[in-house]
Amino acid sequence: MENDFYDKTRPELEQVMAERFEASAYRARQLFEWVYKRGITDVAQMTNISAELRGRLGAHFVFPCAKIRERNVSLDGTRKYLFEIDNGDLVESVMIKQPKRMTLCVSSQVGCGMGCGFCRTATMGLRRNLRTSEIIQQVRGVIDDAKNFGDMFDNVVFMGMGEPLHNFKAVVGALELLRDSCAFNLSGRKITVSSVGLVPAIQKFGEAKVDVNLAVSLNATTDEVRSKIMPVNKAYPIGVLLQCLRKFPLKPRRKITIEYVMLRGINDSDADLRRLPKILHGIACKVNLIPYNENAGLDFLSPTREVLDSWHNGLMRAGLDCTIRWSKGQDINAACGQLAVARQQAVVAQ
């Protein structure tokens, strides 16, 4: 939307200011600081801007606000938000409570078109991409609500509903705002974008030099298995994906996160364990082992604890940086692979 303030990065706002109001990068900075630093969206209250300009700006810009339809709190302190955004569509965001930090997980699409067999979001199909504003509205909505709990997120992950790199332009715009010193001022080291492995988009992401972390869902060591659980593998097989990751530009001491959702009897064999370090050779990476969440409601089982420990120890012995990512918020369907909004619920909301 042309008049939606949250759809504008600072350079884009500077361009709008130059074309419609006055050529002043300083004015754009002032607006950003009022809105993002002070939380003021009533232009009339921006007292260091002339009354005449305030009137014109107030008549031009809109500041939409995502409505919290539901907020559920897990026994472990994780919070899941159901947001109503433009056109009545519904998306979910999660504040994940961890021992030393809070992580905000945001959605980038209404539903998802990637069709991964172990993910509830895939059962929705893809309804549409979110605009930059609709991603930022999730962030602002959680910031406002976090005041009720006396906490705040330290990290942001694009691991909610949707494939972020399938919505490239809007996601990159949101990343710019998250990192802008006049907006949310987050370090790129505190932001992670996850992808199922869209090779051309990953290449484009690398070329754009967006200073954030990249995570890639691998979830198998053979094309046969990966194609069964992740249809994207038919277009971009494991070898093609891993070659892309070997060439991905990384800053010093940065690593790509390889996400591996463990599915009992499907991708957790001893042979898979032996293959994984070999196929990841030459990639600066760390591995997150993610036990499948059985209450996601799909026809898969979590690995046994014995197998999980064997994998963790085996990958560490093979020289890989490896952690087990225990999901939070399972009791409120807020954990990895659990986010979904019933189709009929979204229709009713329109």
Image: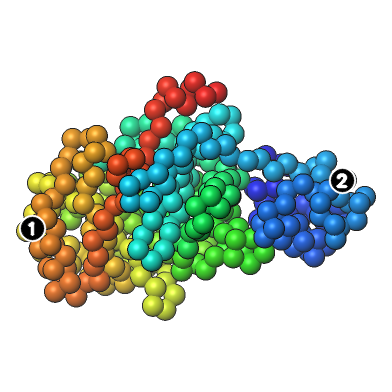
Report the residue at 83% width, 48% height from top: 44
Q: Quadrant of residue 247?
A: bottom left
Secondary structure category for the residue under label 1: helix
Q: Position of residue 79 (x, y in %)?
A: 42, 47
Colour mapping used in the image? rainbow
Q: Where is residue 7 in the image (x, y as percent from the top left)?
A: 64, 47
- Count the marks: how many? 2
Q: Position of residue 13 (x, y in %)?
A: 73, 54
Report the residue at 77% width, 52% height from top: 16
Residue 235 seen in the figure: no
Q: In this view, does 309 lie to the left or right of 52?
A: left
Task: Give me the C-alpha separation between circle 1 and circle 2.
Answer: 65 Å
Q: In which quarter of the image is residue 162?
A: top left
Q: Which of 21 and 76 is in front in this view?
A: 76
Secondary structure category for the residue under label 2: helix
Residue 349 seen in the figure: yes
Q: Is residue 157 left or right of residue 240?
A: right
Picture layout, residue 204 above or below residue 225: below
Which residue lies under the disc numbered 1? 306
Instruction: Say the numbered circle drawn on residue 31.
Output: none
Report the residue at 39% width, 28% height from top: 342
Three-letter amino acid code of the residue under disc 1: Glu
Q: Which of marks 1 and 2 is nearer the N terminus?
A: 2
Three-letter amino acid code of the residue under disc 2: Arg
Q: Position of residue 157 (x, y in %)?
A: 43, 56
Quadrant housing the N terminus: top right
Report the residue at 45% width, 54% height from top: 104
Which residue lies under the disc numbered 2? 56
- Name the residue at the right extreme: 52
